[in-house]
Image (cartoon, helix red, strand yellow):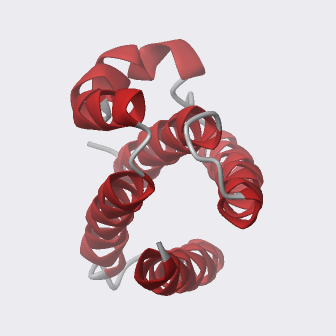
Amino acid sequence: MKYTEEISNKLNKLLIKNYDAEKGYLNAIDHVDDERLQMFFKRRVSERSEFAKELRTEILRYGEIPEDSGAFKDVLHRNWASLKTLLTSNNEEAILNEAIRGEEAGLEEYNEILKDRNLPPTIDSLLLKHKSAIQASINTEKSYKELV
């Protein structure tokens, strides 16, 4: 496998994770009453959309094809099925727990890819920026959880 293809495959995994998180947060917005929590989720939607845009740009820069939003429907079904069940109950604490779980899984994926010390500096820097934002999101979600 070519180096550019290998990098693009890794970035596509993260791209799908970001599509997944974006969709999950969109669903969560409609199922919480707390306005601060709704705004927090809206910011996460915007952030994850921006992450996806940045990842698509990098994948294209390496001459590969980014996953499109239709390619992740099965992933969404699997990863957010438990969230869907929670959403019907409108239990804000349970929704936050699931969001934290999803973000921690995403963080693990970023950590795994960042272990590759052969990443180009621009990609390494981009992924570290995303990772920091995800960690901050987890911390905020945990603090919201204490308030509900």
Residue 77 sits in which quadrant? top left
From the viewer's perspective, is 38 left or right of 124? right
Q: In this rendering, is residue 77 above or below 130?
A: above
Q: In this rendering, is residue 76 above or below 122?
A: above
Measured as percent of width and height from the top left, residue 96 is found at 41, 61
Q: In this rendering, is residue 134 above or below 128?
A: above
Q: Residue at x 62, y 81 (%)?
A: 129
Number of numbered tags placed on the structure image: 0
From the viewer's perspective, is 25 left or right of 79? right
Q: Nearer the viewer, residue 26 or 123?
A: 26
Q: Residue at x 58, y 73 (%)?
A: 130
Q: Quadrant of the N terminus?
A: top left
Measured as percent of width and height from the top left, residue 136 is found at 55, 85
From the viewer's perspective, is 27 left or right of 46? left
Q: Nearer the viewer, residue 109 or 113?
A: 109
Q: Residue at x 44, y 16 (%)?
A: 71
Q: In this rendering, is residue 89 above or below 61?
A: above
Measured as percent of width and height from the top left, residue 12 is found at 44, 42
Q: Nearer the viewer, residue 74 or 114?
A: 74
Q: Residue at x 43, y 75 (%)?
A: 145
Measured as percent of width and height from the top left, residue 84 is found at 34, 28
